[in-house]
Image (cartoon, rainbow, N blue to C red):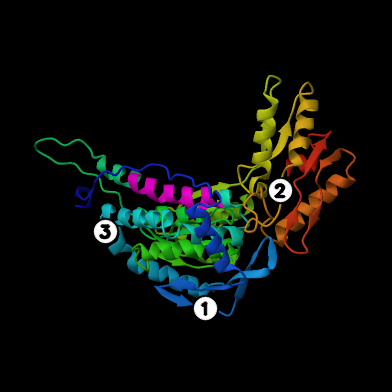
Amino acid sequence: QRWQHRSAIQVTNEPILEFKPGSPERAALQKALADLKGKTEDIPCVVGGEEVWTPTVRYQLSPFNHAHKVAKFCYASKELINKAINAALAARKEWDLKPVQDRAQIFLKAADMLSGSRRAEVLAKTMVGQGKTVIQAEIDAAAELIDFFRFNAKYALELEQSQPLSVDVSTNSMVYRGLEGFVAAVSPFNFTAIGGNLAGAPALMGNVVLWKPSDTALLSSYAVYRILLEAGLPPNVVQFVPADGPVFGDTVTSSEHFCGLNFTGSVPTFKRLWKQVSENLDRYRNFPRLAGECGGKNFHVVHSSADVDSVVNGTLRSAFEYGGQKCSACSRLYAPDSLWPQIKEKLLQEHGKIKVGDPTQDFGTFFSAVIDDKSFARIKKWLEHAKKSSNLTILAGGGCDDSVGYFVEPCIVESKDPQDPIMKE
């Protein structure tokens, strides 16, 4: 009776460290960054608890220095993905029968490792591999991921604590089981924490998982995976399978044992996966659960009574922190005529203070390069559109240079037409 093995735990949000000069956390991070300099980490697929290499080799490049190959990895083939499915299914029953208290302790231990001895390593790999500044890495790969693991454990235990009413002649109990099959976790490049959570949360609840990390976040994702194993996660509970997106999607959604998708990424990719699941519905043993978070064209609407400083500070931070590479980033600003001159003046004034560069060399960098050559080319296309369009005026920025890294200046464009493609796409 697993529900009897439960106990409440007290958790708080992980404190965000400041990395001030002379602080121990700054020294530890600088050492971790130095250890990664010029090095390439070999990252295998991990299937059935064994490291596997395939002939399809890929590299993860540092966004701000693309001459630096930070990771060498390989794509899992269709056959290897199917092998991973079978390995996961073989572990499902034993893992699901493990008391939630025991499963929770694994994630609590992983959180403690991330909070302590492994913090600098994961931050450094997030900075070098994904181009994050020290503060953006800290709030993601440390604070948010630690909170995910701790609060997920807390909520899982509380869920099992909540039991139905019983009377003298009968006892009613509720047990939460993992799904009968496997869950596919598809994670994005922009948050190390999301990768750990997309794979970790289903596993905590008794599921077995195939984790396909983003090609441009392999270094940090593999570090998180290794920490989970060291914290006690059984090898077959989460299979680590970097793969070509369509190959992974086609393979997992065609398996009769597919029972869940935990996804963060683009709208077109999620639509494609959803359609595949719909087309294959008759072959599944269960109705798959699909959970997805996708990006959007976010905006700020400014009221005529708004405080100009708050508008400008909030907009610049939302638009340009991590180069705007977040689903929450602001890409449009709608301002009233009565305030626009003041907002415009302040925007341009503060824009000039934004520092772009190598975040590992200067901890005062506001943001670094965009993630890869595809992102750079896409942004460059829109900058060229802005320069040519009669409806658009570039007020600040607009330059880009990929000679060393995928650097794009923070750009502010004024539009006369709310229907211009740059305002909609």
Q: Are marks 1 and 2 in contact (CB under 8 Å)?
A: no
Q: Quadrant of residue 320?
A: top right
Instruction: Report whether 311 appears left or right of 107.
Output: right
Dot 2 or dot 3: first in sequence order is 3
- x, y percentage for residue 13? 42, 42
338, above or below 311, in the image: above
Q: Which residue is the site of mark 2?
A: 355
In screen coordinates, is 302 left or right of 184? right
Question: Going by the image, does 189 lie left or right of 319?
Answer: left
The residues colored magenta run 137-154
Label drawn at residue 190: none
Secondary structure that dominates the magenta span: helix
Q: Residue furthest left?
A: 169
Disc 3 packing (10 Å; few <14; some 14–19; many ≥20): few
> Residue at horizontal 70%, vertical 26%?
308
At which x and y percent is residue 103?
31, 56
| Res 345 quadrant in image | top right
Give yes or no for residue 139 being in the magenta stretch.
yes
Instruction: First in sequence, mark 3 or 1: give its number.
Output: 1
Against 330, residue 339 (above or below) is: above
Q: Residues within 10 Å of mark 2 (few under 14, many from 20)?
A: some
Q: Is residue 280 visible in this depiction of the protein?
A: no
Q: Which residue is mark 3?
A: 98
Q: CA distance from mark 1 to mark 2?
A: 40 Å
Foreground mark, 1 or 2, reads 2
Mark number, residue 53: 1
x and y, in percent, of residue 330 in the image: 67, 39
- Tell me if I can see residue 103 in this picture: yes
Estimate the x, y position of residue 286 in percent, counting from the top left. Answer: 40, 55
Identified by mark 2, the residue type is: Lys
